[in-house]
Image: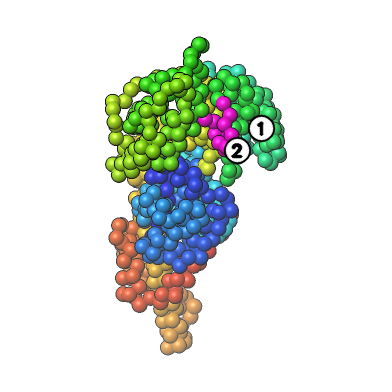
Amino acid sequence: MSLLVVGLSHRSAPVSVLERAALHADAQVKLLQDTVAAEPATEAAVLATCNRIELYADVDKFHAGVAELSTLLAQHSGVGLDELTPYLYVHYEDRAVHHLFSVACGLDSMVVGEGQILGQIKDSLARAQELHTAGRLLNDLFQQALRVGKRAHSETGIDRAGQSLVTFGLEQLALGAEVSDWARGKKALVIGAGSMSSLAAATLARVGVSEIVIANRTAERAERLAEILNDAGNVVARAVPMDSVSDELTRADVVVSCTGATGLVLTAEAVASAAPGVGAERGWVARPGADGVPPAPTRAAPSGTTARSLAEPVAEENCPLDLAPVQATAGFSVLGEAAVAGMAASELEQHAAWVDNAPRPQGAVTVVDPVQEADVIAALAATAAVIGRVPERRRPEPVAEIPRPTPSLFLLDLAMPRDIDAAVHRLGGVRLVDIESLAEASADAPMAADVDEVRRIVADEVAAFGAALRAAHITPTVVALRTMAADVVANEIARLDGRLPGLDDKQRGEITQTVRRVVDKLLHAPTVRVKQLAAEPGGAGYADALRTLFDLDPETVAAVSRAEDSTTDEKDRGSS
């Protein structure tokens, strides 16, 4: 076995990298075709989900295979190899099998135990079969992974260790409340009609929303999903075209989006514009040239307040950067290093210009030299770049947080790349849960005791699969040996006929059967034992030893392998 997997997931890479590396359907097809066309790989399959991208291949050389698969992933994802490499993981042979079986059981999911991954593995196998990039190894591997995943869910309580991504996301939206209590009576908008969106719609119906609107680019799929929901009788559902999303957003309390779009489906500006009650309640003001991203919240000045003195903190009104207030005094002191850590000098200068232009009492004398302050800003940025933080000039002063309104619009983004602008996080009165926040929330999720049982199942299945694969590897050699023995018997019986032409059929039959029994008994113990030895770790060399000892024709062995692979392919096509 020369199974190799190269990939990245939510465990190895930040969501921002996963989002950029996401592969749409056409890119997955091209990646598979290019992989099997590359020299080290003979089979290939891609497992691409919202939180993982993995390329599986049967390779003849490990190091060349790793280099080629990594390069192909970088080329087709659009993320440079140098940038992608630190986030890639590599598994080989038994460790690759262990990894896929763990994934199939939900042990490697963002939400432990979720079952959606089984459908995604099935789709991955079907795609590879359709493109004829999956041979005997990957067919056997993925089909066994599906069986192992189903076994884990049926024999253990792994389902109790976690929920589907949809359920977990709704729990995060509910902020600790019972999801059914939180959802009861709400109106929901579901954008997309694929498997994840369909699951979201069914889950929303189950937890008690009063209405579900399905928006999808393909009207037939949206109408079909709405029809299914209406037939279930738990909710009123209807389908709308995608260009109605803005209108429906004004009526919705909950929005779930999971499409295959490569760009944003909902921008922050669209959310604020389509839900004017939300925007007004949250106190956001429009700022030209912000690409739809709302600025920092406005703090209203108390009634009767006039301009502030230079010694007072400057308010955040329309600050071009979302920073804590800065004292307008000589020396440019920042209130809290975390607010500006890692900022470029140009951004610090932008903030400083805002401070310089803040309202001041008439006749007040400016004590800050702009040239001197600019030098201080540049020095501060340079120091921060070297030491990794912004040095404090004085003890940070506490800054009162602006209380955020209670959310009245809830958004759940399950797409990768994201459907909903991350800037929505900054909108008060709106709660957005996306893949990134789900990853953070699930990092400390408790593990159920059933997880250990599933791990034992995975370990047993990996050992059994490896043994079966190694045993299967020697089978063509054993078949070729027995074929050679049968040919020897047939040739010797033919020679006997020439020497003893007077033998009748009964005598000839008895002699033939006796010779065959002798050959079978001589070969039985060695062939049984060599299969047992080959099934053990490190047993791959026994096939070579058998070919050498009996001087077997390599082409005969290869012909047996091709015949078995052809039979396996026909069976797989019939079952898919």
The residue carrying pointer 1 sits among few (fewer than 14), some (14 to 19) or many (20 or more) residues within 10 Å by Cα, namely many
- The answer, for residue 228, to whether it is visible in the render is no
Residue type at the position of mark 1? Val
Image position, residue 208 (x, y; %): 58, 21
User: Label 2, label 1: how many angstroms apart (C-alpha)?
Assistant: 9 Å
Residue type at the position of mark 2? Val
Image position, residue 314 (x, y; %): 43, 23
Would residue 543 appear left or right of 260 to someone viewing this image? Answer: left
Position of the N terminus by quadrant: bottom left
Range drawn in magenta: 285-295
545 up-or-down from 162: above or below: below
Residue drawn at 60 percent across, 38 percent down: 265
- Farthest residue to the top: give it: 304
Image position, residue 98 (x, y; %): 37, 48
- Farthest residue to the bottom: give it: 499
- The answer, for residue 331, to whether it is visible in the render is yes
Residue drawn at 30 percent across, 44 percent down: 386
Quarter occupied by residue 387: top left
Q: Which mark is residue 558?
A: none
Kindly identify which residue carries mark 1.
245
Name which of mark 2 and mark 1 comes first in the sequence: 1
Kindly identify which residue carries mark 2.
265
Foreground residue among 189 and 333: 333
Which structural element holds mark 2? loop
528 up-or-down from 455: above or below: below
For the stretch drawn in magenta, what is the main secondary structure? loop
Would residue 142 appear left or right of 524 to someone viewing this image? Answer: right
Would residue 529 appear left or right of 425 to someone viewing this image? Answer: left
| Residue 318: in magenta span | no
Residue drawn at 55 percent across, 54 percent down: 27
